[in-house]
C-alpha cells in the first residue's frame, strides 16, 4: 500500500482502470492537476482575452495600475461536467474560489500595490476500480478507491508603476504552495477480510517572479506583455522530500483595439514550456508533460460609455493545450466559448460580474469532457 501511495504521487495508481466519480475534472488526475487560470469573471467572459489588461486578474502585474481606487475582488466558480473514458461516463460538479485580490494606489505616488490568491492547479478526484485478488490462494473480488483532495495555490505580491499614462511597468513575487490529501482504500468481497486503508499528504512549495508592461502607442491600441518564471517545485510526502519538478516559464502577449467608443476587441496568446517538468514528473510515476499554447479572443460592448462597467456585453472564445498527459495517445486540449456581463451599484462602489462558459476537453478518442462553468466575481471599492 505504501508503494501505491508513492506511485499515485503524480499519476493515478498503477494498474487502475478507473471510473471517475463526481469530483473535479478527469484531466486533473495526472501530473500536478488541472491548471488554473488566474482570471476574473470579466476576463473569463471574454475567453481570457482581457487577462493582461485586467487589474482584477493576476496575469500581468502591470495591470494593477488600471485600478484607480482600493479594490477587493472575490471570485467563485461552479462547474458542471460530464466525463467519458474507457471505463464509461459519469457526471459531476464542484465549486472553487479561484481568484481573490486586494489592491490599491499608494497615496501621493504612481505606485499601485496588490496581493492576490489564485488557483494554480486543482487535483480533487476519486477513482474506483474493481478486480480480483488472491491473498491466500483463493480468488476474492475487491474494490479499490483512490481519493485526492487539494491542489496548488499561487500567492502573489505585486506592484505597478505608471511611468506615463501610456507606459506602465509591473513586477511581482509568487509563492506556490499547497497540498493533496491522498487515500487508498481496499474493500474485499469476503466479509471475513477487513478493509485496508493508507493515507498520505503531499505538499508543494516554490517561489517565482513575474514582470509585465502595458503600452498605449495610440489612443485606439493597447499592448500588453508578461513573463513569469517559477523555481523548482519541491514535493514532500508526509514531510519527507519525494520529488523535484522544474517549473515552466510563461510568456504572454495581448492586443486590445478600441474600435469605437463602445466596442473593444482583444486577443491574447500564452506559451509555457512545461516540457521542463517532464523528467521530474515521469520519475515520480506520471505519464509526462508537454509544452502548451493558449489563444483567446473576445469582444466587450459598453451599453453605457459613461459607466462602461455597468451592464456591458462580453463574449469570447478560447483554445488551450493542457500540459499533463492522461496516456500516450496524445496531448489534452480544451476549447471554450463564453458570454457574460456585470452590474455596478452603490454609486459604483460595488459590483458583480458573471461569466458563463461552455467547455470541451479531449485527448485522442478515449477521453472527453464537456461542461458548463459559471463564475461570479464580487468587487468592492471602499476607497473610492
Image (cartoon, rainbow, N blue to C red):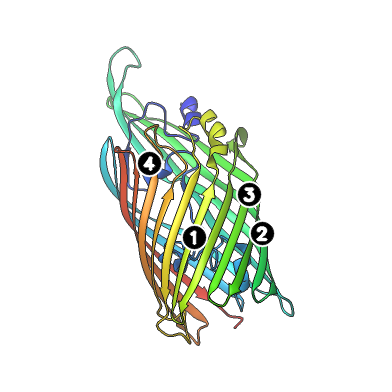
How far is mark 4 from mark 1, CA to CA? Answer: 34 Å
Q: Earlier in the sequence, mark 4 or mark 2?
A: 4
Q: Position of residue 124 (x, y in %)?
A: 43, 46
Task: Give the quadrant of residue 358.
Answer: bottom left
Q: Quadrant of the C terminus?
A: bottom right
Q: Nearer the viewer, residue 55 or 133?
A: 55
Task: Give the quadrant of residue 104.
Answer: bottom right
Q: Position of residue 310 (x, y in %)?
A: 44, 81
How far is mark 3 from mark 4, CA to CA? Answer: 32 Å
Q: Secondary structure at mark 1?
A: strand
Residue at x 49% of width, y 71% of height? 257
User: To which residue does mark 2 refer?
Assistant: 172
User: To which residue does mark 4 refer?
Assistant: 126
User: To which residue does mark 1 refer?
Assistant: 268
Q: Position of residue 343 (x, y in %)?
A: 42, 79
In the picture, the disc for residue 229 is: 3
Labelled pair 3, 4 in contact (Cβ < 8 Å) = no
Instruction: Tell me the mark number nearer the camera, choosing from 4 and 1.
Output: 1
Q: Secondary structure at mark 4?
A: strand
Q: Secondary structure at mark 2?
A: strand
How far is mark 2 from mark 1, CA to CA? Answer: 20 Å
Mark 4 Cα-neighbour bin, 10 Å: few <14, some 14–19, many ≥20: many
Residue at x 45% of width, y 67% of height? 41
Amino acid at each position: 500500500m505504501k508503494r501505491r501511495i508513492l506511485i499515485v504521487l503524480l499519476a493515478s495508481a498503477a494498474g487502475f482502470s478507473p471510473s471517475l466519480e463526481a469530483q473535479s475534472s478527469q484531466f486533473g488526475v495526472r501530473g500536478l492537476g488541472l491548471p488554473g487560470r488566474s482570471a476574473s469573471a470579466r476576463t473569463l467572459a471574454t475567453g481570457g482575452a482581457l487577462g493582461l489588461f485586467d487589474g482584477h486578474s493576476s496575469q500581468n502585474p502591470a495591470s494593477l495600475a488600471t485600478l484607480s481606487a482600493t479594490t477587493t475582488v472575490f471570485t467563485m466558480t461552479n462547474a458542471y461536467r460530464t466525463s467519458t473514458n474507457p471505463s464509461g461516463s459519469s457526471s459531476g460538479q464542484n465549486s472553487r474560489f479561484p481568484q481573490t485580490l486586494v489592491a490599491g494606489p499608494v497615496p501621493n505616488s504612481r505606485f499601485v500595490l496588490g496581493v492576490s490568491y489564485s488557483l494554480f492547479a486543482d487535483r480533487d478526484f476519486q477513482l474506483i476500480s474493481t478486480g480480483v485478488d488472491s491473498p491466500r490462494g483463493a480468488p476474492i473480488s475487491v474494490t479499490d478507491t483512490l481519493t485526492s483532495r487539494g491542489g496548488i495555490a499561487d500567492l502573489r505580491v505585486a506592484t505597478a508603476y505608471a511611468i506615463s499614462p501610456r507606459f506602465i511597468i509591473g513586477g511581482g513575487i509568487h509563492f506556490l504552495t499547497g497540498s493533496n490529501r491522498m487515500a487508498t482504500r481496499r474493500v474485499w468481497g469476503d466479509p471475513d477480510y477487513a478493509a485496508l486503508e493508507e493515507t498520505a499528504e503531499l505538499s508543494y512549495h516554490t517561489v517565482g517572479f513575474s514582470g509585465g508592461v502595458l503600452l498605449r502607442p495610440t489612443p485606439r491600441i493597447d499592448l500588453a506583455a508578461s513573463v513569469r518564471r517559477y523555481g523548482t517545485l519541491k514535493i514532500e510526502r508526509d514531510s519527507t522530500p519525494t520529488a523535484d519538478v522544474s517549473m515552466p516559464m510563461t510568456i504572454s502577449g495581448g492586443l486590445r483595439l478600441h474600435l469605437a467608443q463602445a466596442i473593444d476587441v482583444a486577443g491574447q496568446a500564452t506559451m509555457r514550456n512545461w516540457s521542463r517538468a517532464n523528467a521530474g514528473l515521469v520519475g515520480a510515476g506520471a505519464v509526462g508533460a508537454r509544452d502548451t499554447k493558449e489563444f483567446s479572443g473576445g469582444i466587450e460592448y459598453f451599453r453605457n460609455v459613461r459607466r462602461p462597467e455597468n451592464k456591458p456585453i462580453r463574449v469570447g472564445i478560447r483554445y488551450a493545450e493542457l500540459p499533463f498527459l492522461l496516456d500516450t495517445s496524445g496531448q489534452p486540449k480544451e476549447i471554450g466559448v463564453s458570454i457574460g456581463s456585470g452590474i455596478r451599484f452603490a454609486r459604483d462602489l460595488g459590483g458583480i460580474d458573471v461569466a458563463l462558459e461552455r467547455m470541451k476537453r479531449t485527448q485522442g478518442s478515449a477521453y472527453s469532457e464537456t461542461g458548463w462553468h459559471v463564475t461570479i466575481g464580487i468587487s468592492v471599492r471602499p476607497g473610492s
